[in-house]
Image (spheres, coloured by chain):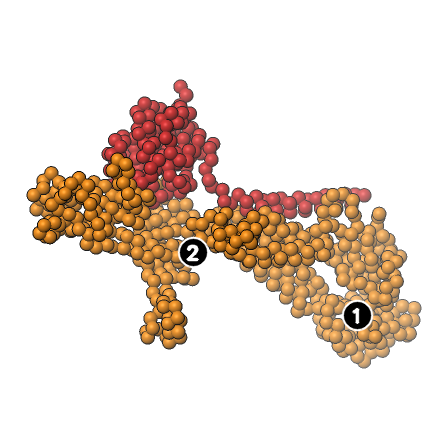
Amino acid sequence: MNKKKKRLYMRSAILAVLAGLVIYALYTNLTRETRGNLEAGDKAPDFLLTDLNGEKHRLSDYEGKGVFLNFWGTWCEPCKKEMPHMEKLAQEYNGEVEILAVNVGESQFQVSNFADQYGLTFPIAIDSGKEVMDAYGVDPLPTTFMIKPDGTIDQIVIGGLIQEQQVRELFERVKPSS
Amino acid sequence: MGKVKCECGHVNPNGTILCESCGRALTEKAKNETFVDMRYEGSARRSQTYNKTIIDKVWNFFSSVKVGIWIIVCILVAASFGTILPQEFYIPSNMPAETYYEDVYGTFGKLYYTIGFHDLYNSVWFSALIAALGVSLVIASLDRVVPLYRALKNQRVDRHESFMKKQRLFAEQKGTIQPGDLEKIRAVLVNKRYKVKEKNGALLAEKNRFTRWGPYVNHVGLIIFLLGAMLRSVQGLYIDELLWIREGETLQVPGTDGEYYIKNEGFTLENYQAGEDPEVFNEAINRVGTVAKNYQTDAVLYRDEKNELPGAKPELTELKKDDIRVNQPMKFDQFAVYQTSYRQGEMKAMHFALTNKKTGREYGKVVIDLFEQQKLYDLGNGYKVELLGYYPDFDGFTEEGEPTSKSPLPNNPAFLFNMITPETPAGEVSFAQIQNTMEPLGETKYKMSFKNLETRDVSALTIRKDLTLPILALGGIIFMIGVIQGSYWNHRRIWIREKEGQIYVAGHTNKNWHGLKREIQLVLAGTAIPEPIDRQKE
């Protein structure tokens, strides 16, 4: 029964196409919410920000070094707690792991005032249009992205880093192996 | 299970009821019936024949119209449940859905939430029902249109008399067709736009066969429509974003990959005025107080010529200016920007005066922009105000006595000033809020007295792009073509045949039998061929 076989193949093919469409539709519908969110292992989106001293920082220029990318605000209490640890380790890991602190849309005055108050020397940039924040899908502050020397995200830390040890462990993870 | 060979010699697919070619009944049931079932021309519905493998069983399930109707009923019932309480999308965004439904609607609300009706239209099972409908449409249509097409294509001109006898419109009479009668009939039929075929003294006249494809065209339209709806979830085809923008701000338009920027040049809310606007509004104004007339954002659209990385300074060129009003969006490059919401009176700047407490004399005014402060405000003549701290949403002091802010929004702005005057060159520290000043480091001779507040409005714009609309429109148009094609024409056939001294006449139409009868009357007028009778009336 050649014809019968042909019909079976035909039906199987049509059903397969339909099943494919249905699965695709259900999948895209269900993942719509989380789509575009960054995860560990993803390539960190590149950006270009100007820090308080007028220096430009492009993420891709940091390739070969680990990056501690921190999103913060002056009003946020946990941000205030983790800053001193960050300052200390920035000195210690100088040249190996760089800190980029991105303030989310506050005024120049507020940010410089804060930096002076806490004696921060690592680069701090203001993301005035919240463009970088959107690109990284940051919701609560602080959020820290640990970026490996190859430019991929090693870990995303949501919330404050209270202990110096926690920050040190993160630094160790993205330190270029030499 | 094999082919069915009819007495006429035509080989029919297994399951055929009426021979595709001559129309003889092939099953016992069909032989015993008074009328033949012409719905699918007695063709073998493909699903009815094989039922062996899983594939066949799935196919048969979806090919059933009964199943299809049940799917539609399920969708209707399910969809109606979603309308009992507001969907999650519509509840206030600051309330978690877990508690909102129970708090507002009680036990029923809790049940509603637990079952998952709060987000019904995005649920897996609802999507699955819609998908089942799509599958059912495809398979049920294929299962019918292919055999029907075959049967209509293979039909013979000289149908077997048993087929004609079982038509609803039928007549037979002893005798022979008069010479010239067929020519006469043919002329009238052609005039009525029938396609006429003759063979062995038999005549088949047929018109508007295309109307039989109406339902299938209609289904194709529906399937395209469903595909279009599905494409909405494909990235880049459908964008629906919200942008809160303050008066004077220029922000990137979300969803445009940083290509466009938009500036809010001002938001206006106008109300209808009793006396000024048409009288029809008076009653409503009296009843509710204010009736909104217009919500408007004066917007400027820019393109970022460089469009570098996020965070980079854009190089803007103005593209256009437009007033965005409700239902009158600003349109550009597949995007439409709609007026969605607003918030009035957000604090923008505060005015203070450096005042000598004793004399009350003012030594100049300081205007502090709440979004862009200065470190030092020089009032001249040795009078200066240094800003030590800014707390946009002041909510108290820490244990160490440091002022704190609970958010970056200027809801309750507070300032720490250092006032330098020729009288107090070392400076005096004052903590100032609206209508309130404090002297944390001891009594001062001067104070920053609050003078004035500048506010501005914030407008919410919806940015929408929908590339699936043309697909939905195409689906809709094809759907309507199918409806029209199937509704406004009738597929009519007339058979005339002489066999062994007997004249047979039969007629069939898929609808409007009265019309066919009148047409046959005209066609046969003036000939010796008997007029078929509608036997269903008897």
Q: Nearer the viewer, residue A139 or B144?
A: A139
Please give the residue where the numbered disc 1 appears in the rendered image: B507
**Callout 2 amino acid:** Ala
As drawn, B418 above or below B212? above
Front disc: 1 or 2 = 2
The residue at the point 42 percent across, 62 percent down is: B327
Q: Check contact, mark 1 vs mark 2: CB within 8 A.
A: no
Q: Earlier in the sequence, mark 1 or mark 2?
A: 2
| Visible residue check, residue B39 | yes
As drawn, B67 above or below B519? above
Please give the residue where the numbered disc 2 appears in the rendered image: B336
Q: Locate residue B462, reporting x and y percent.
A: 42, 54
**Split into 4 quadrants, where in the image is the N terminus of chain A?**
top right
Q: Are marks 1 and 2 on the same chain?
A: yes
The residue at the point 40 percent across, 19 percent down is: A178
**Callout 1 amino acid:** Gly
- Label 1, secondary structure: give it: strand
> What separation in Å lies between label 1 and label 2 (alpha carbons)?
57 Å
Q: Locate residue B305, reporting x and y percent.
A: 34, 46
Q: Quadrant of residue B271?
A: bottom left
**Residue farthest along the bottom direction in this orientation:** B526
- In the image, the chain rendered in red is A
**Residue farthest along the top direction in this orientation:** A178
As drawn, B503 above or below B479? below
Q: Viewed as shown, does residue B124 lie left or right of A163?
A: right
- In the image, the chain rendered in orange is B
The residue at the point 37 percent across, 62 percent down is: B295
Tell me the chain of label 2.
B
- Label 2, secondary structure: give it: strand
Q: Quadrant of residue B531?
A: bottom right
